[in-house]
Image (cartoon, rainbow, N blue to C red):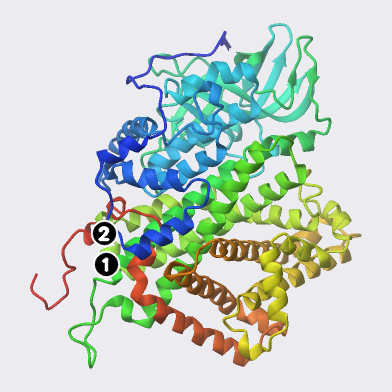
Amino acid sequence: MTTRSDLQTPAPSTDVAMPAPATEEATTRHTREEISALGAGLRAATDGRRYADVRALARATVPARLMVRDAAQTVPEAREWTRRSLRELVGLGLAGSGFPAEHGGLDDVGRSCVDFEISALGDLSLTVKSAVHFGLFGGAVTSLGTDWHHENVLPQTLSLEQIGCYAMTEYGHGSDVASLETTLTYDAATDELVVHSPTRSATKTYIGAAAEDARIAAVYGQLVVDGRTHGVHVVLVPLRDEVGQPLPGVTLGDNGHKGGLLGVDNGTITFDQVRVPRRMLLDRYGGIDDSGTYVSDIDNDNKRFFTMLGTLVRGRICVAAGAAASTRKALSIATRYAVRRRQFDAPGHDGEVVLLDYLAHQRKLLPAIATSYAHLFAVTEIIERLQDLHEAPEKDQEAHRELETRAAGLKALMTRHANDTIQVCREACGGAGYMSENGLTGLRADADVFATFEGDNTVLLQLVAKGLLTGYKEMWGDLDVRGMVQFAARTLGGQVVEATAVRPLVSRLVAAAARRSEDHTLLDRGWHLSMFVERERHVLETLAARLRRGKDHDAFATFNAAQDHVLMAARTHMDRMVLEAFVTGIDACEEGEVRDVLERLCTLYALSSIEADSGWFQAHNRMSAGRAKAVTTQVNKLCAELRPHAVAIVEGLGVPEAWLGSAMLTEPEVWTPGVPA
C-alpha cells in the first residue's frame, strides 16, 4: 500500500511555451489555398457566425505536415509523431481553449469543439490524443473540480507539463458507467481515498495515453464513505514518476496494435490499494468535508450521477463534429478522384467517361455530400448553442437537457454516417482507394471507433427517445419504462409541434405547404419539413401508446420488445433537427449562386432521406407509390444538376486540398488503362 502526498509534477520531456491563439500575423507562414469563388462562398456560409474566423485562420496557418501522417509508420513511429505534433498543435493555439481564462484558456467551450473539428480534418490520432488530454482529462477537471483543482492541475495540463488520461471504461463495464467496479474508499484515519480494482473486470482499459505518456488519471469509481456507496465519482490519481515509471500500486499495460488510431497509446490500468489525499477528489457536485462526512447539494444519487455526466456533454459534440469532419475529408478525396479518373468508352464522348458522369457514381457521392452539408450546419448550430448556454448568467435546466439529448443524437447519427460513407468512398475509388497512400483506408480505420466511444450509439439513441418521451423534464435514473410512461401519458401530439414552432421560419414553411396540392410540392421546402415532422410525430405517439399498453407488465420485457420503435423515434427526431438546421442556415445566406447551390443540396438531402424511408411513408399513407417514383426521379435530376459544381461543392466542405494526404490527387493526371503515362 502506498501513499501519494500530493500531485506529481514531472519535468517535461521537451520545453514548450504556454500556447496562445494563432494570430493574423501567423497567416503569412503558410501558402494560402486557392479555391473557386463558389467554394469560398460555401465555406463562408457553413462556417457559422461565431467561429468563422477561427476556422478560416486554421485553414490558413496549420501546416499540412501536422494534418497528414505517413501511413507506413510503425506503431512506435506513429506514437512519436503524434506526441511531437501535439506540442506543435498546442503552439498554434488549437488546444485548451475551453479552460478558464484565469488558468491560461479562453473559457470558450464552443471554441474547444471547433478546435477538435479542425484537427479531425487531419490525422485522427492527433485529434484523439489532444482530445483525451485536453477534452476528457482537462474537461473533467474543469467541469467536476473546484478552484483548488483548477489552480493546481490546469496550468500543467495546458502547457503539456503533465499529460493526463481519462480512466472511465473497464473490461466489465463501458456504456453502463453507473455499474463501474473500481472503488474509491475513504479512510478517515488518514484522510485519504483508497483507489482499488477489486476484480479483473475492474481493470481500466482502452484508456488513451495510459500505455506510455499519462502521468495522472481522472479515475471513475464508486465512492464509499463510512461503509455507504454514494455512486460514481472521479478522483485524480498520479500514475507515473518523473522518469515515467509506474508508481507503487499502479499496474499499467499496453493495448497494443489496434484497428486504427495507431498514434494513440491506449492502455490498461489496475489499482492495488493506491492512496491519494482527499482533496484529489473532484468534488464540485459531491465530496467529503473535514469531518469525514459525505456532502452534496444534490440529494438523489442518480440525479447527481447524471448531472456529473451532463457537464461533459461537449465530448459527444466533439465526437459528432470529428466524425462529420472525417466524412467530409473522405468525400473530398473521392469526389476529386471521380472528376479525374476515366473508365469505359461511350458513343458521342471524346475518350473514356469521367467517373462522376455516371449516374450510379453520382448517387454514391452527391447525396452523401448533401447529408454532410446538413450535418455541418447542425454541428455548427449545436456548438454555438453550447457556448451560448455556457455564457448564460443563469442555468436553464431544460435547455441543458435538450442540448444533452441533441448531442447524444448527433453523435450517433454522424458517426454512423461517417462509417458508412467512408466505406462508400473507398469503394468509389476502386483499387486506388485501397492503397494506404491515398488516405481512405487509414481514415476508415481511424474513424471506426467513433461509433462506440463517448457512448455506444444504440444506448445514445435510447437516451434521445427518453428525452422525447419525458419532454426533457426528467432525465435522471435509468431507462426504466415505468418512469418514461409516467411522462409519456401527457399529450405528446403537441410536443413535436411546439419543438418545431421554436423556429418561426419552419412553422411558416410547413403551414404554406399544407395549402398546396401534392402535384406542386415535390421541391417545396415546407413539404419536406412536414414529411419529417409528421413521421416523427407518428412514430413518437405510437411508441408512447405501445409503452403504455405494457405499463402493468415486466418493465424490461416491455422496453426490450419496443427497442426497434425506440430507436426509430430517436432517428426520426434527429433527422428533423438536422433538416431544420440546414433550412435555418440557408435562410441566413444572401441571394445568389451560393444560396442556390445550398438550396439544391438541401432538397437532395431531404428527398434522399424520404426516398430511403419511402416504404414507411407509403405504408402509413403519407406518400403514394407514384409519388415515391417521382422522388427517385427528382433525386437523379438533382445529382445531374449538381454534377458541374462538384469540385466547388467539396471545396465548400472546408478541407484544404493540402490536408487530404492523398497521393492519387497530387499527380497531374490519373493514369487510365490503355493511355500512355
The residue tagged with tag 2: helix, strand or loop?
Answer: loop
Where does the image place residue 636, in percent across and percent down from the top left? Answer: 45, 83
Left or right? Give the position of 151 relative to 21.
Answer: right
Residue position marked by numbered label 2 in the rendering: 435
Where does the image place residue 666, in percent across and percent down from the top left? Answer: 20, 58
Residue position marked by numbered label 1 in the rendering: 431
Up-down: is 666 above or below 256? below
Where does the image place residue 57, in percent across and percent down from the top left? Answer: 38, 43
Query: Hey, which residue is sitting farthest left in the picture?
Result: 676
Q: Can residue 239 be seen from the camera position used here?
A: no
Q: Can residue 468 be seen from the camera position used here?
A: yes
Residue at 34% in and 58% down: 440
Where does the image place residue 539, in percent across and percent down from the top left? Answer: 74, 70
Q: Quadrant of residue 152?
A: top right
Between residues 212 and 593, which one lies in front from this camera angle? 593
Residue at 41% in and 28% down: 20
Residue at 11% in and 76% down: 675
Up-down: is 489 above or below 56? below
Q: Quadrant of residue 76?
A: top left
Up-down: is 405 above or below 227? below
Left or right? Give the position of 423 relative to 526.
Answer: left
Q: Label 1 sits on what residue type?
A: Gly
- Measured in 3D between alpha carbons, the distance from the residue under mark 2 to the one under mark 1, in whole angstroms, is 7 Å
Q: In the rendered image, which quarter contains the N terminus? A: top right
Number of marks: 2
Tag 2 and tag 1, C-beta contact below 8 Å: yes
Up-down: is 25 above or below 218? below
Left or right? Give the position of 462 relative to 84.
Answer: right
